[in-house]
């Protein structure tokens, strides 16, 4: 009897831990924001022009819209303010500030510019 009681005590404890982990995993899935996708697209393409752009994520994140504000701080150093908003909400779902260097020669993405803007 004692062994059966200990077995059920352990079994219910394990079930409670698994249930709690599943609830936390579901909460993480609901809380995701596509701002990382927008930030990586901005950095990888390195296509920066001063101004404000807006758009959406299409079918990937259908309820989200983004705004990207680009301003040049100094020679080739840009400040990029990213904002992601979910439709029906007034507050932004995510905000991120990036500082991106774009070589003067407008070289290929992922390559560093040489002095004077010339590429090999």
Image: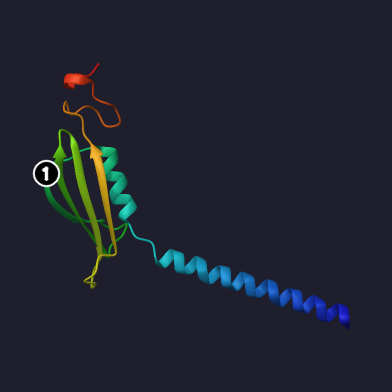
Q: What residue appears at the point 21 percent right and 71 percent down from the top-left corner? A: 90
Q: Position of residue 24 (x, y in %)?
A: 51, 68
| Quarter placement of the N terminus | bottom right
Q: Residue furthest bottom?
A: 1
Q: Secondary structure at mark 1?
A: loop
Q: Is residue 13 above or below residue 117?
A: below
Q: Is residue 1 left or right of residue 75?
A: right
Q: Residue furthest left?
A: 51
Q: Is residue 76 above or below residue 85?
A: above
Residue linked to disc 1: 50
Q: Is residue 23 left or right of residue 103?
A: right
For the image, the number of numbered tags is 1
Q: What residue appears at the point 29 percent right and 39 percent down from the top-left corner? A: 44
Q: What residue appears at the point 19 percent right and 41 percent down from the top-left corner? A: 78
Residue 9: name its quadrant: bottom right
Q: Position of residue 114 (x, y in %)?
A: 23, 20
Q: How is the image coloured?
A: rainbow
| Quarter placement of the C terminus | top left
Residue 42: name its quadrant: top left
Q: Position of residue 27 (x, y in %)?
A: 46, 69
Compare residues 18 and 113 and report the one nearer the observer: 113
Q: Is residue 25 above or below residue 44?
A: below
Q: Residue furthest front?
A: 74
Q: How dense is the environment of label 1, judged by Cα within 10 Å: few (below 14), some, or many (20 and up)?
A: few
Q: Residue furthest top?
A: 120
Residue 96: name its quadrant: bottom left
Q: Position of residue 89 (x, y in %)?
A: 24, 72
């Amino acid at each position: 009897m004692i062994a059966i009681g200990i077995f059920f005590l352990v079994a219910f404890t394990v079930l409670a831990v698994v249930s709690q982990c599943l609830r936390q995993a579901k909460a993480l899935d609901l809380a995701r924001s596509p701002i990382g996708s927008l930030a990586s697209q901005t950095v990888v393409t390195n296509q920066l022009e001063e101004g404000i752009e807006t758009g959406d994520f299409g079918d990937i994140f259908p309820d989200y819209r983004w705004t990207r504000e680009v301003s040049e701080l100094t020679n080739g150093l840009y400040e990029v303010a990213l904002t992601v908003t979910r439709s029906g909400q007034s507050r932004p779902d995510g905000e991120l500030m990036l500082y991106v260097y774009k070589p003067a020669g407008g070289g290929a993405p992922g390559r560093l510019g040489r002095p004077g803007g010339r590429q090999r």
